[in-house]
Every structure is written in structure tokens, then in C-alpha cells.
Image (cartoon, helix red, strand yellow):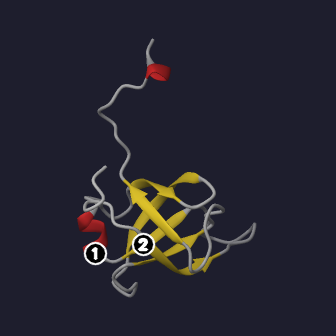
Amino acid sequence: MNLRANPPLHVVGFIATRRGDAERGPQARLSVEEARTRLLNDQELAWIQGPRRTELATIIIDDTVPRGGVVLRDISGAGVSEVIRIQKPDYDTIDDRTKV
């Protein structure tokens, strides 16, 4: 993906949930401008590429998050003050592993 379409984001907050919490699971909150740059919509799944691993998370559009920043919830591959990338899954490319 073009770096202009996927600039890095700075993790400005992290939410860790516990078993029994009403809302749990991987989530990334970012501003509407950052979501628009990446062609992402609210409640859509996207790849979160951290320094240690990549995982799927639900995107939440939240205008309280500063531009260039992201707040993560339950993402074990990144922490506060690290740099990540968020990428929309490519549903149009067939991978050799998916051939029948």
C-alpha cells in the first residue's frame, strides 16, 4: 500500500479490558480524517500492524482522538507511544492459501 494512503499513527492511549467487562476485544479509535485517509468506515475490521505483531480490530471513529493518533483497546502487539499502521483488508486478491 502507498505510504501516503497509510501514514503511521502514534498510539496516544490504550484500554485494557478484563474478563466480565461489558465491551471487550480488539479495537482502534481514530479521527474521521484518519479513517477517511485509509478508506475505513465506523465498525469496519482492519489490520493493526504494530511493532511486534499484526491483528484484526474493529475501527471506531472518534473525533476526540487527535489527528495522527490512535487509541487501542486489547491489542497486544502495540503499546502507548509506539507507532502503528492501520490497513484495510484486501478482499479482492486471492492468496495461494485460499485456492480450492
Q: Residues within 10 Å of mark 2 (few under 14, many from 20)?
A: some
Q: Pick the quarter of the image with the C terminus.
A: top left
Residue 42: horizontal and vertical position, in percent?
A: 34, 64
- Out of 51 and 64, give the one closest to the viewer: 51
Count residues near mark 1 (Cα–Cα under 10 Å), then give few for <14, some for 14-19, many for 20+.
many
Q: In the rendered structure, find residue 9 and report the number of the disc placed on it.
A: 2
Give the farthest residue toward the front. Answer: 3
92 over 87 or under it: above or below:
above
Q: Which residue is mark 1?
A: 32
Expressed as whole percent of the image width and height from the top left, the position of residue 62 reads 37, 79
Q: Is residue 60 above or below residue 55?
A: below
Looking at the picture, tell me which residue is in the foreground, 1 or 94: 1
Q: Secondary structure at mark 1?
A: helix
- Image point 47% across, 77% down: which residue? 10
* Left or right: residue 51 compared with residue 66: right
Q: Where residue 22 is drawn, which disc sits there? A: none
At 25% from the left edge and 75% from the top edge, which residue is drawn? Answer: 33
Q: Left or right? Give the position of 54 relative to 70.
A: right
